[in-house]
Image (cartoon, helix red, strand yellow):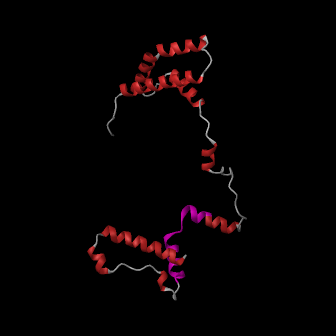
Amino acid sequence: MPKRKHDIDYYIKKLKSIEKSLKRKRLEAVSEPEDTSTSFQDHTDEENDESGAQTILEAETVGDTPPPTSVTVDMVESIAEVPTTSPDVLQALGDLMPEKPSYGPPINSDLARIWSTILKNGIQKESKDKLIDKLMPENCILLKAPKLNPEIAASISDNIVNRDKKIEMEQNQLGIG
């Protein structure tokens, strides 16, 4: 488990600074004078900052205790203040994707069932090897992947030889396809 980069006090200070900046933004957004309920709420938040920090500290140590409700309320209020996106940004992002994609005409139901099974589970190794041997054309040998020279295979590590064999199998499958 990696070490923590910061202790709990660091995160408590960070939360307080975020709360203060959110309060400042809310005050700037509201151009009309504050009514008594808003000022009362702000004073209670300021009074509860230390107790809220203590609750956060306890939540960090206990693990099951939820964070204080004032932080949750601030989070909800900050989410409600989502800025609008400019038309230039929306145009740069492009058109909306359709909710339900459009498909072509249906194929034979037996083929669809077989291909769905193959795509989900793959083909068994024996039947795949039979298909590869059966479908490789005799008159176009260049479709088959070249084999690694034995001299080169002896001079390189086993990991590289195994990697080359895997790539060779993939190239053979592509050639048959």
Residue at image point 64% right, 43% down: 87
Q: Nearer the viewer, residue 77 or 89?
A: 89
Considering every residue shown, the one lying at the far right of the view is: 105
Residue at image point 60% right, 49% down: 92
Q: Please state, as top left, top right, bottom left or bottom right, where the C terminus lies in the image.
A: bottom right
Q: Is residue 119 left or right of residue 61?
A: right
Residue at image point 58% right, 24% down: 29
- Is residue 161 visible to us here? yes
Residue at image point 36% right, 25% down: 9
Residue 25 location in percent, x, y? 53, 25
Residue 127 part of the magenta segment: yes
Secondary structure of the magenta portion, mostly? Answer: helix
Vertical placement of residue 39 versus 149, above or below: above
Q: Quadrant of residue 110?
A: bottom right
Vertical placement of residue 139 versus 126, above or below: below
Vertical placement of residue 71 versus 159, above or below: above
- Is residue 66 visible to us here? no
Residue 85 part of the magenta segment: no
Considering every residue shown, the one lying at the far bottom of the view is: 139
Magenta part of the protein: which range?
116-136
